[in-house]
């Protein structure tokens, strides 16, 4: 089959190389063209085999996966899916890999009851998405910080207009490529922003590290939602990887709520769950944003949010790593305005004023 996606596996474990090879070769549209035990071997195999996608382990002899990825993305950028242990240390390393340009990541197969066929399906889906992904250039300019760390002063004699004065609430969903897209979006958001609730598809061991990383980079406070927090201006809530995040009414305003209900669109947290709660409770005061990602989670929820009177934005194809979720939302009429990632923060803030 001439159009098969050609995969090179890089992992120091012979058992892992064999497992991944068997899983990938079981898909009729994928083929493993080689398996390397370390980075120097992988470098030579890339030159000879010219694979379409790499799977890359972090912990290897001679050169670790991060150093190899850094060199690769500078000298010969290509789609990479990281294979990571789901630990606190692994999550920090994974976030660094995504920052360097890896398209996506997946944990190593575990003997915790998860079926290997489910793991294989997720792995091969991520490889297919990586093949069609738009790679980010290292050192590319980020979105302008429209408001920096503090709002600009109003002219003399005028009362400053605060962004959060409108009572709007911002709801954001993302998947593949979303960790960097969310970072870029938040770099354009001021400290006095409306409340923001975000679902990013990632495992539970990663979301706390992700929130902490964003908190150190952006002007608003960013936290991993714990449930029952007051939804207030200047705060960004990241859905934890183990639960759906939604909004509910409290005695004195809105509160966050976590649900351990079954996955929706194969995801928990699900963007649709978040957007549906926004449509049902917030309506015209909601602003929905759908960013880069594989699949269709969030499309129907964004449509319901728009039908409830909320304003909706979608990331355009040219700036997406994977134009899956935004495309699904756009084709069903859920996106009111489609724009480049670098423009979304500014347009969302304008909608909130």
Image: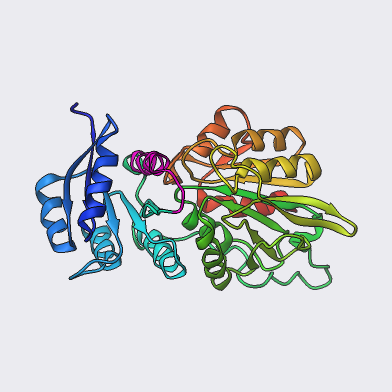
Residue farthest along the right direction in this orientation:
251
Q: Quadrant of residue 41?
A: bottom left
Q: How is the image coloured?
A: rainbow
What x and y, as percent, mark residue 167?
Answer: 81, 55
Q: Position of residue 46 (x, y in %)?
A: 15, 51
Out of 176 and 21, give the one closest to the viewer.
21
Left or right: residue 86 versus residue 344 is left
In the image, what residue occupies the spot 56% across and 55% down?
A: 241
Residue 340 screen position, x and y as percent: 51, 46
| Residue at 9% in and 48% down | 48
Q: In which quarter of the view is residue 5 placed? A: top left
The span shown in magenta is 112-129
Q: Is residue 159 left or right of residue 11?
A: right
Q: At x 65% / y 38%, what residue is drawn?
A: 302
Main SS category, magenta section: helix
**Number of callouts:** 0
Looking at the image, residue 18 sits to the left or right of residue 338; the answer is left
Q: Quadrant of the N terminus?
A: top left
Indicate whether 127 appears above or below 234: above
The reply to whether residue 53 is in sight is: no
Judge whether residue 7 can be spotted in this image: yes
| Residue 121 sits inside the magenta stretch | yes
Residue 239: image location, x then y, percent = 62, 56
Is 191 contained in the magenta span?
Answer: no
Note whether 185 is above or below 285 in the view shown: below
Question: From the viewer's perspective, is 317 left or right of 235?
Answer: left
């Amino acid at each position: 089959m001439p159009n098969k996606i050609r995969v090179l596996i890089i992992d120091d474990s012979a058992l892992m190389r064999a497992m991944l090879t068997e899983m990938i070769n079981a898909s009729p549209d994928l083929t493993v063209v080689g398996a390397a035990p370390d980075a120097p071997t992988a470098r030579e195999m890339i030159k000879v085999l010219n694979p379409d996608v790499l799977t890359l382990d972090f912990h290897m002899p001679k050169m670790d996966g991060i150093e190899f990825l850094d060199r690769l993305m500078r000298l010969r950028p290509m789609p990479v899916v990281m294979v990571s242990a789901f630990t606190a240390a692994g999550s920090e390393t994974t976030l660094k890999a995504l920052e360097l340009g890896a398209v996506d990541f997946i944990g190593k197969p575990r003997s915790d009851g998860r079926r290997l066929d489910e793991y294989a399906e997720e792995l091969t889906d991520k490889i297919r998405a990586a093949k069609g992904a738009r790679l980010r250039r290292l050192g590319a300019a980020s979105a302008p910080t429209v408001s920096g760390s503090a709002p600009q002063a109003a002219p003399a004699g005028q009362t400053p207009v605060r962004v959060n004065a409108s009572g709007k609430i911002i709801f954001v969903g993302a998947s593949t490529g979303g960790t960097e897209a969310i970072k870029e979006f938040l770099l354009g958001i001021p400290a006095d922003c409306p409340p923001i609730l975000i679902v990013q598809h990632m495992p539970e061991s990663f979301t706390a590290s992700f929130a902490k990383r964003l908190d150190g980079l952006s002007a608003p406070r960013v936290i991993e939602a714990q449930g029952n927090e007051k939804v207030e201006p200047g705060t960004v809530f990241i859905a934890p990887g183990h639960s759906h995040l939604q909004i509910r009414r409290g005695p004195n305003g809105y509160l966050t709520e976590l649900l351990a209900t079954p996955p929706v669109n194969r995801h928990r947290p699900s963007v649709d769950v978040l957007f549906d709660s926004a449509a049902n409770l917030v309506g015209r005061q909601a602003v929905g944003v759908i960013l880069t990602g594989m699949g269709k989670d969030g499309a129907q929820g964004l449509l319901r949010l728009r039908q409830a009177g909320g304003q909706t934005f979608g990331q355009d194809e040219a700036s997406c790593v994977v134009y899956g979720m935004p495309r699904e939302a756009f084709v069903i009429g859920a996106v009111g305005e489609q724009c480049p990632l670098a423009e979304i923060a500014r347009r969302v803030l304008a909608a909130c004023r």
